[in-house]
Image: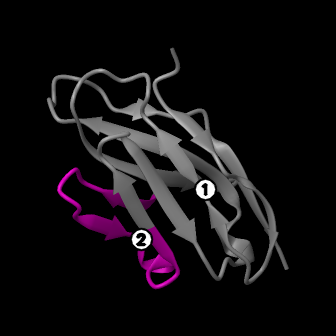
Amino acid sequence: QVPLVESGGGLVQAGGSLRLSCAASGIIIRINAMGWYRQAPGKQRELVAAITSGGSTNYADSVKGRFTISRDNAKNTVYPQMNSLKPEDTAVYYCNAQPANSRYSDYWGQGTQVTVSS
């Protein structure tokens, strides 16, 4: 079973919105933080937004005020709502799940393309 199942990427015009989702349906150990990273061509992967099981959030400066991440702990699913999208938001977005036990490695999704046209 795939650990993380992502959905919601696609093509949108600048100023538009997209809502991604990531379900940790294939993970049986306890998860602490879940979040999304992105990687644009020629750039390093960077954190976009993350949320802990307690609801604490962390956002990249470049998305603050535009992106909101929420989480359904019962479903182990996170939903980043991305508004006011800009062409510079174009990237492959990857879901991440951080196990509560540090002995286990992070889980990564397969990635979903988000393209914002100007």
Quadrant in the picture for the C terminus: bottom right
**Residue 20 at what x, y percent from top left?**
59, 55
Q: What secondary structure is marked by label 1?
A: loop
Between 11 and 41, which is closer to the camera in this rendering?
Answer: 11
Which residue, given by chain and number where applicable, does mark 2 sit on?
60
| Residue at point 70%, 78% (across, down) | 86
In the rendered view, tell whether residue 41 sits above or below residue 69: above
Identify the residue at image location x=77%, y=80%.
14
Instruction: State the residue position of label 1.
Output: 43
At 80% from the left edge and 68% from the top edge, which residue is drawn?
12
Of badges 1 and 2, the one in the foreground is 2
| Front-most of residues 41 and 19 | 19
Q: Above or below — where is 6 with respect to 41?
A: above
Report x, y in % for residue 56: 22, 64
In this view, 65 is above or below 13? below
Q: Residue furthest front?
A: 74
Total numbered badges shown on the rendered structure? 2
**Would residue 17 be found to the left or right of residue 56 on screen?**
right
Neighbour tally class for label 1: few under 14, some 14-19, many 20 plus, Cα within 10 Å: few
Span shown in magenta:
47-68
Q: What kind of element bears circle 2?
A: loop
